[in-house]
Image (cartoon, rainbow, N blue to C red):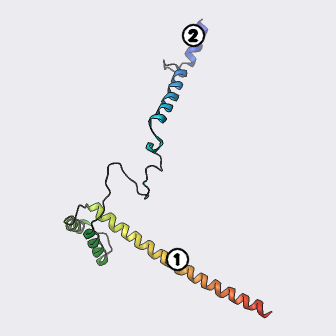
Amino acid sequence: EDEEEEEEEEYNDGDDSDDDNENEDEMDDKESKSVEKPHKERKTPASIFSNTGVYSVPGKVRWQPTTAQFERLEQLFAIDTTTPRGEKMKQVTEELSALGPIQECNVYNWFQNKKARLKKREQDAARERMEEEMRAKADQYNAQQQQMGNLS
């Protein structure tokens, strides 16, 4: 009997609960969780993004500039493409707040996004020009090759 008690103590990790029952409880919990929570409520990487690819925080409304704010932001960007800082940022935000709700972070992000979109458009246009030049050169080369084939 003493040997059996010693063996039990060796396998006992200090937890008085029965391990087999604990595993069954975990499985029951997993099964009940999957029944209780539909798949769409789980926080998977795909579910934290909206269909527009913009991270959405539950209960948080995304800022959208009013038409007047947008037009004024475009005017300011046409004058100076640098993102306003410090006192200039406060002035711009105050001016735009008269046209609708806005925060400094909205102004900052709008300028940063505008510059990024402009840069991407310029890169895309440069890529298109380069591809067009390459197609023209390829067409010219193919025409020369065809002529050489016709002469021989």
Q: Position of residue 114 (x, y in %)?
A: 36, 70
Q: Quadrant of residue 68?
A: bottom left
Q: Residue furthest top?
A: 1
Q: Tell me if residue 39 comes above or below residue 57 in the rendering.
A: above
Q: Quadrant of residue 20?
A: top right
Numbered tag placed on residue 127 in the rendering? 1
Q: Tell me if residue 7 comes above or below residue 59 in the rendering.
A: above
The count of marks equals: 2
Q: Nearer the viewer, residue 104 or 100?
A: 100
Label 2, on which residue?
5
Residue at the spot 46% in from the left edge and 44% down from the top edge: 40
Residue at the spot 26% in from the left edge and 68% down from the top edge: 69
Disc 2 from disc 1: Cα separation: 78 Å
Left or right of 105, for residue 43? right
Of badges 2 and 1, the one in the foreground is 1
Q: Nearer the viewer, residue 111 or 33?
A: 33
Q: Quadrant of residue 119?
A: bottom left
Q: Mark 2, residues whose alpha carbon is within 10 Å: few (<14), some, or many (≥20)? A: few
Residue at the spot 33% in from the left edge and 63% down from the top edge: 109
Quadrant (top left/top right/bottom left/bottom right) for the C terminus: bottom right
For label 1, the SS is helix
Quadrant (top left/top right/bottom left/bottom right) for the N terminus: top right
Numbered tag placed on residue 24 in the rendering? none
Q: Tell me if residue 34 comes above or below residue 89 in the rendering.
A: above
